[in-house]
Image (cartoon, grey):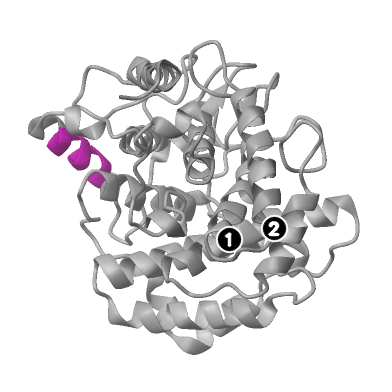
Amino acid sequence: MISREAQEFRSNILAFFESLRLPDGGYGRYRYAACQTQPVLYASLYAAMARHLLCDLDRQSPAQKAEWIAYIQSFQDDDGFFKDPPIAHPGSWYVPPHMEWCGWWHLSCHAIIGLTALDAVAAREFAVLKPYYDEKFLRQWLAARDMNKIDFVGNEVLNLGQLLQYARDFQHVRPAGRAMEIVLDWLDAAQDAATGLWGRAFVTPEDRNKAYQGAYHFFLLYDYDCRPIRYPERIIDFMLTMQTPQGGFGIHANTSGCEDIDAIDPMTRLYFKTLYRQADIEASLRRAFDWVLQNQTPDGAFAFICNQDMFYGSRLMYSGKNEGSAFAAWWRMLSLAIMSQVMTDHPLSQIPWQFVRCPGYQLAPGAVQ
């Protein structure tokens, strides 16, 4: 029996996602926010991941599940990428040439998690990965990463690594395994021993903000492959310094969902790997829990940044000021689910949070994998 607070929280989030679901055209079509009218694949994937996190997918019928899987699979192109052409309008993040830190790379990384949550596997192999199976090409690509822009590099390397791990483990593509070893070896060699992070600058507040945000993405690759992360004590020290008086993480008072989870996630993972500063991590996460809940919106969801509207790469993924969005609802709820593994006395920790054994963002912290 879970607490009334936990029941209400869960019911409100599920009601929010149900309000975004479009009843026509097959099950699994979702809008991004209440102000939108057109379905987008991202919203469908956020709904699948959020409902799985809340153990809600069992409520759908076999026919509904099959329709949802078929809907997601219909977006996969011959090159393996999942593509949603309507979001690739002028001014979006999805017009050619597609950026490696976002674009179809990013969308595809969400698609594989959504499909895994629905007990399905991507129908086609990722042909776009074939150049990266060549060791010379891959090493040149890694060497070309601009470590002065580590916040972007974090996304670039996660996008590639996540698809390599998926190709290796879900589609049994053998060359993907060796390519992933090269990526992790490169990360080991590029890691800064003094901070445990990556990049070329750690002095100014802006440098430090970029460094920890970029590093978050790499930790997910390490954890999925159960590869030890070096310098965990230094990483914990660094992350704790990034907490604001309000309880979020970053260099401004009104921190974003990404800034917050980029510290919350690695600190929680490391909490289960070392005894170092565990009491400090617990205290930090308790403050962060309260801060994340302050970002709830009147519609029962969450804002990415309070009191600001948000353009998330496409006009079809826009949400107004203090209007919940599918992305922010899933993303900030994921922060709470992760922290609940440490903060077991919080009422919301009574929610039966469920993680996905798939490369990427919704991988459980070490103690509950």
Please state if 274 lies on the left or on the right of 226 as rendered: right
Ranked by sequence position, the earlier of labels 2 and 1 is: 1
Residue at 40% of width from left, 31% of height from top?
Answer: 350
- Residue named by callout 2: 277
Distance from disc 2 to disc 1, alpha carbons, whole Å, reads 10 Å
Between residue 40 and residue 304, name the one nearer to us.
304
Q: Residues within 10 Å of mark 2 (few under 14, many from 20)?
A: few
Q: Which mark is residue 270?
A: 1
Amino acid type shown at disc 1: Leu
- Expressed as whole percent of the image width and height from the top left, the position of residue 301 reads 50, 21
Between residue 167 and residue 358, name the one nearer to us.
358
State whether residue 284 is above or below residue 123: above
Between residue 354 and residue 209, name the one nearer to us.
354
Amino acid type shown at disc 2: Arg
Magenta segment, principal secondary structure?
helix
- Which residue is most to the top? 298
Residue at 18% of width from left, 33% of height from top?
Answer: 58
Q: How many numbered marks, from 0 up?
A: 2
- Expressed as whole percent of the image width and height from the top left, the position of residue 197 reads 71, 67
Residue at 33% of width from left, 56% of height from top?
Answer: 357
Q: Is residue 66 visible?
A: yes
Residue interval drawn in magenta: 65-74
- Cβ–Cβ below 8 Å for labels 2 and 1? no
State whether residue 162 is above or below residue 132: above
State whether residue 346 is above or below residue 363: above
**Quadrant of image for the C terminus:** bottom left
* In magenta segment, residue 71: yes
Residue 217: name its quadrant.
Answer: bottom right
Q: Disc 2 on helix, strand or loop? A: loop
Please state if 315 lies on the left or on the right of 175 as rendered: right
**Quadrant of image for the N terminus:** top left
